[in-house]
Amino acid sequence: MIKRLVFGSLCFLSLPLFGQVDTSLYQSLQIQEVTIREDAAGLSIDSKSASLDLNISRTELKKAACCNLSESFETNPSIDVAFTDAVTGTKQIQLFGLAGKYAQIQVEMTPLVRGLLANSGLQFIPGTWVQSIQLTKGIGAVNNGPESMTGQINVELLKPEDLVDAAEAPGSEGRGDLLLNGYANQGGRFEINEAYGARINSKWMLASLGHFSGRQRGTDVNGDGFLDNPLGYQVNGMLRARYFGQNGWEGLYTFHALEDVKQGGQMANAFAPGIGADQLWKSNIKQGRLAITAKTGWVNPDLPDQSIGTIVQVYSHELGVEMGLPKRTAPSSLYSQFRGIQNGGMAQLLFRHGWGALTQTSGIVLQHDAYQVGLDRLELGNGRPWVENNVGLSTEWTYSAGERFTAVLGMRMDAHSIAGYQFSPRFHMRWEPRASHTFRVVAGRGFRMAQPLLEEYGRLASQRFIRWEQYGQVLGGDLLSMESATNMGLSYSHPFKLNYMAGGIQADLHRTQFQRAVIHDFYTPGERSIYPVNIRDWPGSIPLQSVSAGVSVNYNLNKRSELRMAYRYQVLQASYYSDDLNGNGLMTLPVPFVAPHRFMAHYSRSFKGGVVMDVTLQRYGKQAIPGIDPSIRPAIDYAPAFHLLSAQIRQEFKGGDLYIGMENALNITQSNPIDGAVSPQTSQPLLPSDPYFQSHFDATRIWGPIFGRMLYLGTNIAL
Amino acid sequence: MKNLLSLLFILCVSASAMAQKKVEVQFQTDGVCGMCEKRIETALLNLDGVWTADWNVETHETMVVYNPKKIEELELHQAIAAVGHDTPLVKAKDEDYAKVHGCCKYREEAVRKAH
């Protein structure tokens, strides 16, 4: 089979150089038969990897209602999706209940969801561009960077060969090199996506990925005067060139550009005629990115266990945030703005050499980030520039004793211009004492640099007074902004066959314990305190900790239907200053906006004639949220448990599909997502000039959906 | 509580599925590659009464589990032959064989050798 050979060699060429982890590089050759099956499971565990790696395929992504990476984990029991605020529409993911910033999120091994894009970068990866996602639960591999604490998410986008091979494959009749997608929903959002690949000659292939989305029509379902979702648009494009040369050389060169504009806040037509736009509370967020990435690799044709890879990337990110009244009319407490530019780049060299059972991969990486941030908010002073440089040396040794045992020891030393020397040891082990009963152990350390204000910009949509006296630089860029954690985990996975049908059980237990963390404290009404907690200053305390235990079962009930169920229990605690209560001390309190009990069930069924149905039910248990009653200290309140039900029906036809679905079918909404937006007496929307608005406005206490039941419609076409 | 209920639900569903009468048969089927595998298995799985089907690319053996109340064994062979593959009971018609892709022409010596 020609296709199989080509695909096999690609797998082999690309994995050793750029593949994640990959502790199973050697084995990947043997399991390639599985990886190319087109009907391979949507969600599968890499059975040979020493770390707990879940692969999420394109098939699985089709089950998600919409649209970009932040929304693509809806059918995945490992990851939660939460809003950051009720104004900007930004969704954030959580792994083990900890924010996505504590996982290392990469696109083809290069950073994207980081720095200025830490809050919103996931929205810049359209789901239809994604070829597959690798999710590692528990700390990731040292060669990929120091920032992984809870886990690692790597997204592989469509590469030129994916599109060209699809069109050249026997039986495809030339379809598959041009993919189109269109989507529209009841909330006024539309999307157009494109992917096109072409072969230039025997060595070069090109591809373009395009995305345009927007929302022109605003809705205010709950009548609080605020848009449920911001209006705006996103233009996002990528040009990619692929080179496969002789003698083991290959390259992938990518240019990426995007612009995203989101305008939210109060709608003029919710108020009496004559109220001008300059009297309304508005949010205005502009983001942009330009990046060039060059990856070049070489595999020794005589010694396939030996390879060298380089990644060079330069980028420029821009983030502008304006919230409140227009500056010229605003009393300063009703206005906040910052404007940031991040120019940076990285260069990495990776070298791999194998001696049969023993393999090592070592790397050196240089990173540079120059930030220029302008800031305008009453209590925060001015912005400033700063620079972060890092040199990282890493080495990872993999030992495989047959099929049943793999151990990986990784060590990493970073010389960081602010954090100093940081040593990150990591260990992964996989042991299969009996066939198809696999145990995995993970332990390791990671660190990152926080940008407390910027990476949580949605939380500026609030009249909470920001306190940061104990802090050096609230923008980041000093030692107090460093966060570090150790992660330990144990997992068990067992694929089985029952009644001729495949199924699997997975169970995992993870603890992530921070030595240093930047705490955002919302437990004093009307205030938001940001401060670092360091275990050295507070011996015996736990700055931030997550303990998570999960179990999931999947089983094919028959040849046409699959059932997946998962339950997870997670306890998140952090240390908060409690001066108000009992003098100087730290108090251990639950982290808000994390539901300790999470349950998910997913049922999928295909019918004759190419109809596929998916139903997903999620339960979020009771969760802690900041309270607003000043007489209760600490001000902790609890949001009720709720369910989200979504369903989708897809009709597949030759060269494409058509899908229709419903999100939040039970029509669950949070009744007052924005505090202070409406008058407590009349329930009419308030203007920012109203004293009640000024003392109570807060869009950050969001725990549930704002928009209720929503229908959507979409189509995929392969030409 | 909810989880328990769901678990019970699964058990009931699988118990009722197992209660159905099933017969497993194995027979040789000519073919060469993964594309053939997909074609053979899809043809069988599309039949009502077939619980599962698997064609082994190395041994060229087809394993089918089916409900004899709903379908007869000969119909399995006919379904495979209809997509161009020979079984011990039914030989594919030339016009059906002609439809299989060039790389799957298992009756040709050269193609068999290439795999």
Image (spheres, helix red, strand yellow):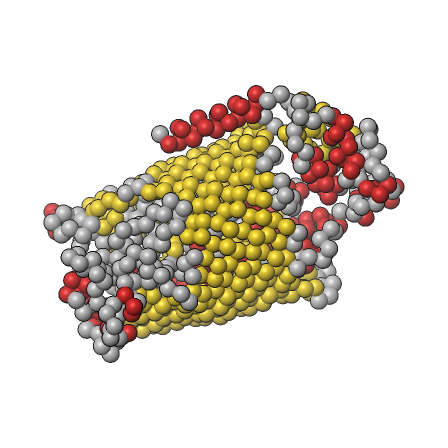
Say how many tags the image has: 0
Q: Tell me where residue A408 appears, x and y as whole percent.
A: 51, 42
Figure check: A626 above or below A463: above
Q: Residue furthest front?
A: A273
Q: Tell me where residue A316 appears, x and y as whole percent.
A: 45, 70
Figure check: B58 above or below A159: above
Left or right: A246 with respect to B17? right
Which of B18 and A103 lies nearest the eye of the viewer?
A: B18
User: Quarter of the image holding residue B17?
Assistant: top right
Residue at (59%, 36%) from the top-left corner?
A560
Q: Tell me where residue A615 appears, x and y as whole percent.
A: 48, 42
Residue at (53%, 23%) from the top-left corner?
B16
Q: Residue furthest bottom?
A: A328
Which of A551 and A587 lies nearest the eye of the viewer?
A: A551
Which of A710 and B61 lies nearest the eye of the viewer?
A: A710
Q: In this rendering, does residue A353 appear at all?
A: no
Q: In this rendering, does residue B10 appear at all?
A: yes
Residue at (67%, 42%) from the top-left corner?
A33
Figure check: A575 above or below A292: above
Q: Residue furthest right?
A: B109
